[in-house]
Amino acid sequence: MNKNIGLVLLTIGIGMTAGFGAVLSPDFRKATLAEGQLQMANNRADALHAEYCALRSEHNLKDAEGCGASPSLPDTAEEKLALFDQGDELLLVKITQARVAYRLALKKIVPLEALVVEAEVQGPEARLSGWTSAAGIGFFAGLVLLVAGAWVCRKAAAFDASEEGSSSGEAVDFGVLLTQVHASMSVLHQEMLALATPSVVDADAIKERLESIQKEDMARLCASGPRVQSLHGIEGMAALFSPLSAGERKMNRAWSALVDRHWPEALASVGGAVDDLEGTKAALAALR
């Protein structure tokens, strides 16, 4: 199975789910747009009012209409317009132009404030319903493509792993190789138990045999992770490699103890490795 097809499906699926998932429901989008436009219009009006107040101060006019120490302006644009419509102060042309510009900005804010007030607060159900009607089909289509791409990639990876294992001459069955390692370590353990007073020669001979098991069958077992995952999944691989890794560590400890001529530690570590390998076999039996 072509892995590239799976990657293409994954890419398209991720793009579609991300794109359609970011779409807002129509009513919520309308309310958000109105709030944004209102905020921009308010910022513009505030800048014009500040300019108007600066001109009044420049020409030594008294504080009024929200400028300087005069009372603050009302909250809504409609109330501000009503306040400015009451003014009958004679002003210079430049100041009058600034005042008119501010009043025009307020008139543009009035309908925007009405839109924001009319917009209802959407609850989760209404927002979800609106999003589903606007982007649900595209999102779920992308989700299907994403799942399909993941499935194709996994099948392709499993096929590649099995092909790699066959071409490299490794045992096709993980259990067969595990049984070989367990049997070799069990024999080694029994022979060590039979040595009441081991000599240096005995320790060196055991070390060489342990090295052989580590470098051959045990190394092939540890390298079979991708094939084990393709057959049993992530959880199955974890169930197998947890005791198997513990056994490998104890084999390494036994080798180090033999190098240091520490026979009791070497014997205990080899026995522990045998127990861990038995645990790995039990985990494999539970998966089958």
Image (cartoon, rainbow, N blue to C red):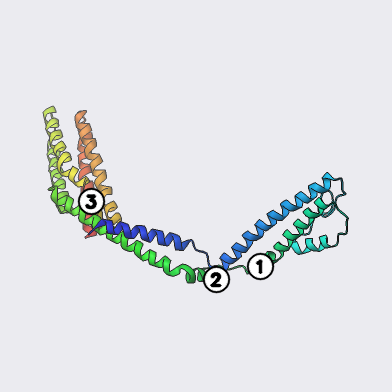
Q: Which mark is residue 126?
A: 2
Q: Earlier in the sequence, mark 2 or mark 3?
A: 2
* Residue wearing tag 3: 280
Inspect the image, locate mark 3, and give the three-letter code of the amino acid beneath it: Thr
Q: Earlier in the sequence, mark 1 or mark 2?
A: 1
Name the foreground residue: 241 vs 203: 241
**Looking at the image, residue 25 lies above or below residue 223:** below
Inspect the image, locate mark 1, and give the three-letter code of the amino acid beneath it: Leu
10 Å neighbourhood of mark 1: few (<14), some, or many (≥20)?
some
> Which residue shows up at 66% across the image and 70% down it?
118
Looking at the image, residue 77 sits to the left or right of residue 88; the answer is: left
**Looking at the image, residue 100 lies above or below residue 58:** below
Q: Position of residue 239 (x, y in %)?
A: 28, 53
* Residue wearing tag 1: 115
How far separated are the C-alphas under marks 2 and 3?
53 Å
Asked which secondary structure carries label 1, the reply is: helix
